[in-house]
Image (cartoon, helix red, strand yellow):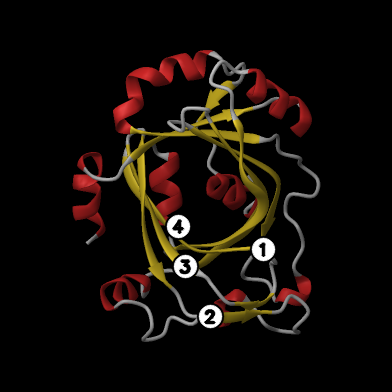
């Protein structure tokens, strides 16, 4: 199922996703640079918290495929916006696809669930409802996976004046170990700060125009993956 989607990703609703690290600049400094950019980036949506439970095999196959540089790959996550805990009313199941520099998603409904970080003994392993509400083909695929990482961050959204290019700014990354009871959760990122991650996103048809956009971004291009960062924090790498 996933392989067939990866094989056709470049021909469908795919987009380029280029990530940059912003060094030691503050959010205000990065936003100022975006406003002064020739493409005139402006805020598109209000900032919000993004929460993701990443799923992987016991051998962490998705992680190793990424760090080994395999160009065709995917990640599986349950994502929601807003508060980290309580009743998660609108989660969604996402298969994040990658083919070289092109990215895309398969998004499916996921059942509501309750996540209480103060509940003794509760963990993500038992909180996620892999029930009949998940579409059959995807439910079968998920039998091979379990929670490997929980992360969250504050995301800011910007768009170029012509509407062709979007930029997200992700900051305040937090990583949590899903194998621990929620009562014992701690932020794996507390002692090692991460910079603001800037991601430039644009459709395949604007690829030739993108060079002018990246030339105006005084940041370092990176392969930074929040999932990879989090797994390495969890296992002490």
Mark found first going from the N terminus, 4 or 1: 4
In the picture of the structure, the residue carrying the numbered disc 3 is 92
- Alpha carbon of mark 4 to alpha carbon of mark 1: how far? 28 Å
Residue at horizontal 31%, vertical 42%? 14
- Alpha carbon of mark 3 to alpha carbon of mark 2: how far? 9 Å
- Alpha carbon of mark 3 to alpha carbon of mark 1: how far? 13 Å
Q: Crowding near pointer 1: few (<14 within 10 Å), some, many (20+)?
A: few
In the picture of the structure, the residue carrying the numbered disc 2 is 112
In the picture of the structure, the residue carrying the numbered disc 4 is 60
| Quarter of the picture holding the C terminus | top right
Mark found first going from the N terminus, 3 or 4: 4
Horizontal side of 11 relative to 129 (left or right) equals left
**Eyeballing the image, is 125 above or below 34?**
below
Horizontal side of 37 relative to 26 (left or right) equals left
Q: Where in the figure is residue 116, as x and y percent of width and height?
A: 71, 79
| Mark closer to the observer (3, 4) | 3
**Identity of the residue furthest to the front in this view:** 162
**From this viewpoint, is residue 190 visible?**
yes
In the picture of the structure, the residue carrying the numbered disc 1 is 82
Mark found first going from the N terminus, 3 or 1: 1
Q: Are marks 3 and 4 in contact (CB under 8 Å)?
A: no
Mark found first going from the N terminus, 2 or 1: 1
Using the rendered view, name the quadrant where residue 124 is placed.
bottom right
Secondary element at tag 1: loop
């Amino acid at each position: 199922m996933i392989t067939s989607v990866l094989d056709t990703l470049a021909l469908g609703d795919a987009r380029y996703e280029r990530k940059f690290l912003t060094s030691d600049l503050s959010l205000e400094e990065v936003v100022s640079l975006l406003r002064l950019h020739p493409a005139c980036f402006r805020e598109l949506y209000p900032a919000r918290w993004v929460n993701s439970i990443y799923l992987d095999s016991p051998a962490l196959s998705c992680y190793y495929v990424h760090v080994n540089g395999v160009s065709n790959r995917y990640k599986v996550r349950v994502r929601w916006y807003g508060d980290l805990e309580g009743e998660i009313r609108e989660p969604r199941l996402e298969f994040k696809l990658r083919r070289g520099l092109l990215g895309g998603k398969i998004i499916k409904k996921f059942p509501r669930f309750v996540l209480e970080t103060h509940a003794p003994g509760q963990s993500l392993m038992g909180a996620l409802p892999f029930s009949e509400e998940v579409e059959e083909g995807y439910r079968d695929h998920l039998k091979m996976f379990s929670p490997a990482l929980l992360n969250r961050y504050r995301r800011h959204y910007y768009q170029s004046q012509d509407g062709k290019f979007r930029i997200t700014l992700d900051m305040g990354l937090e990583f949590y170990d899903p194998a621990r009871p929620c009562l014992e959760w701690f932020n794996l990122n507390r002692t090692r700060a991460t910079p603001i991650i800037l991601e430039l996103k644009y459709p395949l048809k604007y690829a030739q125009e993108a060079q002018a956009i990246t030339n105006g971004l005084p940041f370092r291009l990176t392969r930074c993956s929040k999932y990879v960062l989090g797994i390495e924090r969890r296992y002490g790498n």
